[in-house]
Amino acid sequence: MARTSIRLNRWFLPLLALASFGISSIAVTIPAATTSAPFNFVGASALGAVIYAILSFLITLIAQGPRVAKDRMMTTLVLVAFAIAVVPLISLISTVVTLGLARFDGDFFSSSMRNVVGQGGGALHAIIGTIEITSLAAIISIPIGLLTAIYLVEYGRGRLARAVTALVDVMTGIPSIVAGLFAFAVFALFFGPGIRMGFAGAVALSVLMIPVVVRSSEEMLRIVPSELREASYALGVPKWLTVLKVVLPTAVAGLVTGIMISIARVIGETAPLLIVAGFTQSMNYNPFNERMMTLPVFVYFSYSSQGTDTQAYIDRAWAGALTLIVIVMVLNLGARLISRIARPHTSR
């Protein structure tokens, strides 16, 4: 006799999730009450997810059979994995915003730390340094990375292409401190061992940025349909013009996203900039002369070199971290806007 499948109400799973969290909250609260410990929300959520997964599987198995039960179990595991990935991110952002707003004011964005001890001061010199150094790194890295990706996808064959691919793979895993030491060694050959300048920091960041641009651009160019290239060749269009007028416009949305990801990858680097860009409390608009401050280094020194007024330094560190997050968010929003405007429009 065939099994009768019982259709569960659409509110059943949400109510089961609330009941599971309630059971886990009670289970966590009872031991904590004896020791006067605070309520452990993370522990209650984790235990509630386990209880929900077990109960939903067993109830679905009884009501709707093993096939639907297995599907619901896998759906639950996917949702749990999503929560594990998102909850720490939300916690991080909320913590940075909460603690960073204490000094996220006009003075922070309009003054430097020159002659400032304790309260006051700002990160204008670090913001300017971050923008200039990252922009120089992008100017160096984007053409090199994009042209390398075009070579690998459109022209590269044989040993040279395999060697370039292997080199890019190796560069992708280079620690940032090694990139800083490389840039320092190169500039020390020409300017002496005591050299510190923003442009050297841009070169160090470009070493980290180029392989990311190459890899992301290469993947975007490979997913362009080969039929588009063949149609262009059939019309007598040369290969270089096909790449310029067909391939790149088709892949522009993914290319812009990959480039923005690579910029976000290097904008928060600290180790190479500590070595080659140095540290300063004053404004420096010239990346080719003297030391230049950046936001990651500003955050590091604000937290590690606290003066007598400890809270003032900690507040500046959190405000610098919040500024970095805002810059990365603006870059990502800008990338989405540019890719939406620049993508080819198709009509039905």
Image (tube, rainbow, N blue to C red):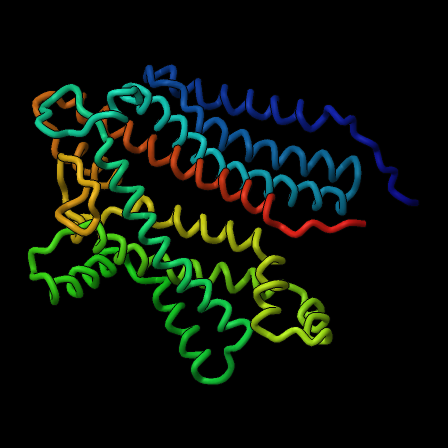
Asked if 302 appears above or below 143 in the picture, the reply is above
Closest to the observer, 195 or 158? 195
Asked if 277 appears above or below 232 in the picture, the reply is above
Closest to the observer, 337 or 98? 337
**Could you tell me residue 117's position as x and y percent?**
9, 24
Would residue 20 be found to the left or right of residue 234 on screen?
Answer: left
Q: Residue at x 66, y 70 (%)?
A: 229
The answer to which quarter of the image holds residue 163 is bottom left
**Could you tell me residue 115's position as x and y percent?**
8, 27
**Could you tell me residue 100's position as x and y percent?**
31, 24
Q: Residue at x 21, y 55 (%)?
A: 200
Asked if 63 appears above or below 343 in the picture, the reply is above
Closest to the observer, 278 or 20? 278
Would residue 179 be found to the left or right of residue 211 on screen?
Answer: left
Q: Residue at x 43, y 73 (%)?
A: 165
Would residue 68 be found to the left or right of residue 225 on screen?
Answer: right
Residue farthest toward the right in the current orientation of the protein: 1
The answer to which quarter of the image holds residue 173 is bottom left
- Figure quadrant of the N terminus: top right
